[in-house]
Image (tube, rainbow, N blue to C red):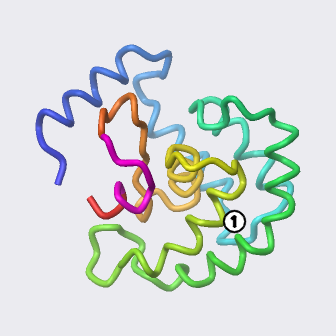
Amino acid sequence: MLTRQEFNAGINVWRTTYWPRDFHNRFYAELAEINNAGQFSAEWWNRILPHLNCWRATRPKPAEELTRRATTKLKRLIRAFQTIADAPNDIAADGLAWEIVEEFTFVAAEIKGVKTPTFCSKLCHFVSPKRFPVVDKRAMNLPKSNYKEYWNL
């Protein structure tokens, strides 16, 4: 559960960004339009990549490298998403266990090929915001080193 202190810390980080006041309304409407119910394609990737860049999830990897790596993972993303498609669409829902979402997070993490959880959490969050919380080590100031640890919190 999010504490008041953590909530306020998140608001303070948001106030230091260039994000507009209605950031989430606009952003999640666009994600809903981009999300193609688990049919990950080159077109989907090209629409998601700018958001990953904007959220600083891709640094220091160049877009060309990430695109090449993502292209080789699209079929695996589709298969892994099929395992969560019928699962509850909410991390707080009963029955949504790490084992259900684990494979999808592993494939997402392989796209960037680093061990830190930030890229994985953001990509997964963009695909299914209620199932996958975002991790930002700077904003959250938490010592966890992998997405599973954050997700289980």
With 89 as the anchor, is 83 left or right in this view? right
Q: Is residue 152 left or right of residue 37?
A: left
Residue 136 lies, with reference to residue 131, above or below; the image says: above
Q: Is residue 147 magenta?
A: yes
Q: x%, y% of residue 141?
A: 30, 33
Residue 54 pos. (x, y %): 62, 29
Q: Which residue lies most toward the left here?
A: 4
Residue span colored magenta: 143-150
- Give the vertical position of 126 relative to 97 (above or below): above
Q: Magenta segment: does it hold 20?
A: no
**Residue in the image at 55% along x and 57% along y:** 124
> Is residue 113 shown above or below 136?
below
Where is residue 26 shown, x and y percent of the image? 52, 37
Pick the residue in front: 132 or 58: 58
Residue at x-position 57% and y-position 75% = 103
Q: Quadrant of the C terminus?
A: bottom left
- Left/right placement of residue 36 relative to residue 28 reads right
Q: Residues within 10 Å of mark 1 (few under 14, many from 20)?
A: few
Q: Image quarter for residue 71? A: bottom right
Quickly name the residue at label 1: 36
From what the image shows, is residue 118 above or below residue 87? above
**Quarter residue 83 falls in:** bottom right
Q: Assign a secondary structure to mark 1.
A: loop
What type is the residue that disc 1 sits on?
Answer: Asn
Tally of marks: 1
Across and down, in percent, residue 133 comes to 40, 53
**Residue drawn at the location 78% of the way across and 52% of the way down:** 45
Residue 147, image quadrant: bottom left
Q: Quadrant of the N terminus?
A: bottom left
